Amino acid sequence: MKISIHYAFLPHTDADAALGFYRDALGFEVRNDVGYDGMRWLTVGPENQPDTSIVLHPPATDPGLTDEERRTVLELIAKGSYGALTLASDDLDALFERLVESGADVVQEPMDQPYGVRDCAFRDPAGNLLRINQAG
């Protein structure tokens, strides 16, 4: 039996800013861009991995959420403590420089971690934490 990750979901608070980060800075292809009722869902992913995608979605749209819960979700996103994702690159330093040049929000410069990984970290425009590991 083979199991793979098909979609991962992260909230966005500005679709155009999310496109600027995921498409323009990271170089992901846009696989879907869907608008509905004033909201927008974006599906992006690496060109060489057509079966793995990230869906960037409007936050707190579940009709079952109370106004207070919706505010809490938006506050957590703004603090950068709601969504996270770890990516890998075969050239961590070059990707780090490309993201810095794009104006991305640097959380951590590339460094060797005590648990055996070399990585760096950024926040996307919504505040989601993205760690990027140096691939094998």
Image (spheres, grey):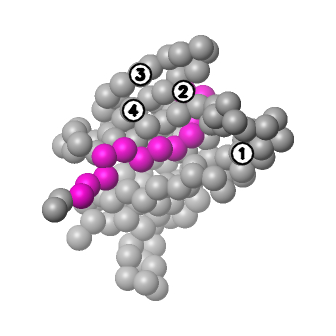
Q: Is residue 14 magenta?
A: yes
Q: Is residue 6 magenta?
A: yes
Q: Earlier in the sequence, mark 4 or mark 2?
A: 2
Real-space Cα separation, disc 3 to disc 1, in angstroms = 23 Å
Q: Is residue 15 visible?
A: yes
Residue 108 picture location, percent across and down: 55, 64
Question: Does the residue at mark 4 contact the one at mark 3 (Cβ under 8 Å)?
Answer: yes
- Amino acid identity at mark 4: Thr
- Amino acid identity at mark 3: Asp
Local SS, label 4:
strand
Local SS, label 3:
strand
> Which residue is drawn at the image coordinates 63% and 53% (left, top)?
82
The residue sitting at the top extreme is 37
Q: Earlier in the sequence, mark 2 or mark 3?
A: 2
Q: Is residue 22 above or below residue 122?
A: above
Q: Earlier in the sequence, mark 3 or mark 1?
A: 3
Number of numbered discs on residues? 4
Q: Is residue 27 visible?
A: no
- Amino acid identity at mark 1: Val
Boundaries of the magenta span: 3-15
The residue that mark 3 highlights is 33
Image-based side of 124 in relation to 72, left or right = left
Image-based side of 114 in relation to 90, left or right = right
Question: Does the residue at mark 2 contact the one at mark 3 (Cβ under 8 Å)?
Answer: yes
The label on residue 73 is: 1
Local SS, label 1:
helix
Q: Nearer the viewer, residue 59 or 77?
A: 59
The residue that mark 4 highlights is 43
Q: Which mark's residue is nearer the viewer, 4 or 2?
A: 4
Q: Nearer the viewer, residue 14 or 97?
A: 14
